[in-house]
Amino acid sequence: MEEMTKHGAVGLAALKAGMDRKTARKYIVAGTLPSEMRAPRDWRTREDPFAEHRDEVRALLRETPGLEAKTVFELLALKYPDRYAPGQLRTLQRQVRAWRAAEGAERDVVLAQRHRPGEAAQTDFTSTGELAITLAGEAFAHLLCVVVLPFSNWLWATVCRSESMAAIRRGVQRALFQLGRVPQFHQTDHSTAATHRIPEGKAAEGESGRWRFNDDYLAIMRHFGLTPRTTEVGAKEQNGDVEAGNGAHKRRIEQALLVRGSRDFASLEAYQLFLDGIARKANAGRGPRVAQELAAMRVLDVRALPEFREEVAQVSEWSTIRVKDCAYSVPSRLMGEVLQVRLYEDRLEAFYRGTLQLACERVVGRNGRRIDYRHVIWSLVRKPGGFARYVYREEMFPTLAFRRAYDALQARLPGLAGDVEYLRILHLAASTLEADVEAALGLLLAESGPLTSERVKALVAGERRPTVPEMPALVVDLREYDALLGRVGT
């Protein structure tokens, strides 16, 4: 149009506008913009394949609103064989969606809430498998206990092994001491076993349909002056702030890991410091709203709770204790005694009259076990006949090299004789260093000669024999002392 006002030549104006001459003439005659000439299409480009059964489809949807379009399509295909092809499903899905929008039943609306500063903290657990974190080269399966303040979206994340009471205690406590303030409410979802007594069967639920809080969780809430509350049953969107925060925070962690160039950490403490740094950086951008939250909250004026739960456990004749439905071996000299157990979220410590007897990683889940061969090897050596059917036999192979050694011994000395030889090797590992015995086993398994406990013992003794370093004789030059005395005299 601008070119036409300059010279009035349709061909030249069309050429400069990059369009056909006939298209340009059409726009000139119409005197309107191309976007204004488009009219909504009110005709079909192809025949509706469901026109014949449209009323039947609508009747099905009115009678059973929960039916999906795919289910309706399968019913039609079953009722009218050779009438419909799989490629027509998308057409029916569009029609069902349009019908529901125009004539369907009313739907539940998510009611956006206006959060008040400092009113509540929301806590939730989130999995981290997609991050592929390793500690000292070992895969580290874990969760994050995430605490969020909904008004400002302030967030703090704590590494945990499972959704346990110890994880709730540690995660909430770390967040509160990071803030230095306490909100009025602490909110979790309705199904968290760490905070609720989940009964067997729905009949045991309370009158309101909610499960009751367990005593340990209520004790934590009382200590910090928090009022516990949960989301409604089946209404996970009420915890939406922390749910959304989980995904966003894991994306931040993923980006930080890409920048770091490695997903391996030297220790759990190093990994937690890494996460704390990411959370502080994210929270720094929420300063003004966080300040409003802090101003509305009560000052944290209580001491930190111990991060463990104390229990007592009696040592059985198997030289084991059972804690939270899991078995742990202890030194056999403690059989029959009662131990004081400190159960942390990630580890376990057992004391006898104030002296530490066992410190190990906590077993996750139920009916697990952690058996140390060093606690029972002397009994096995004295009674080798019990090894074949020993309940904890598989725990007597600390590494793959020991398992391969046992198989090799059984191939040469089947039955009790092979068990005796292997138990002597295991006794040697308990008496010296397991790593030295493992290295000796690796050498002997690579050779063609027979594997025996005596050969293993000889190799270990050779590796552990100290060597005397050769040192040159020290030559003393007394002139250095004369020079030093001369400088002092001056």
Image (cartoon, rainbow, N blue to C red):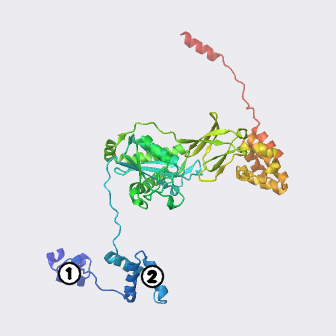
Q: Circle 1 sits in a helix, a strand or a loop, which is it?
A: helix
First reached walking from the N terminus: tag 1 or tag 2: 1
Q: Position of residue 246 (x, y in %)?
A: 44, 55
Q: Which mark is residue 27?
A: 1
Q: Which residue is mark 2?
A: 73
Q: Answer left or right for 145 relative to 329.
A: left
Q: Answer left or right for 173 relative to 34.
A: right
Q: Which mark is residue 65?
A: none
The three-letter amino acid code for the residue at tag 2 is Phe
The tally of labels here is: 2
Residue nearer the viewer, 255 or 239? 239
- How far, Cα to Cα, is label 1 from label 2? 46 Å
Q: Residue at x 83, y 52 (%)?
A: 418
- Judge depth for marks 1 and 2 and give the one in front: 2
**Quarter of the N terminus within the rendering:** bottom left
Q: Answer left or right for 282 relative to 374.
A: left
Q: Residue at x 45, y 36 (%)?
A: 303
Q: Answer left or right for 285 relative to 405.
A: left
Residue nearer the viewer, 431 or 198? 198
Q: Position of residue 367 (x, y in %)?
A: 64, 53
Q: Residues within 10 Å of mark 2 (few under 14, many from 20)?
A: many
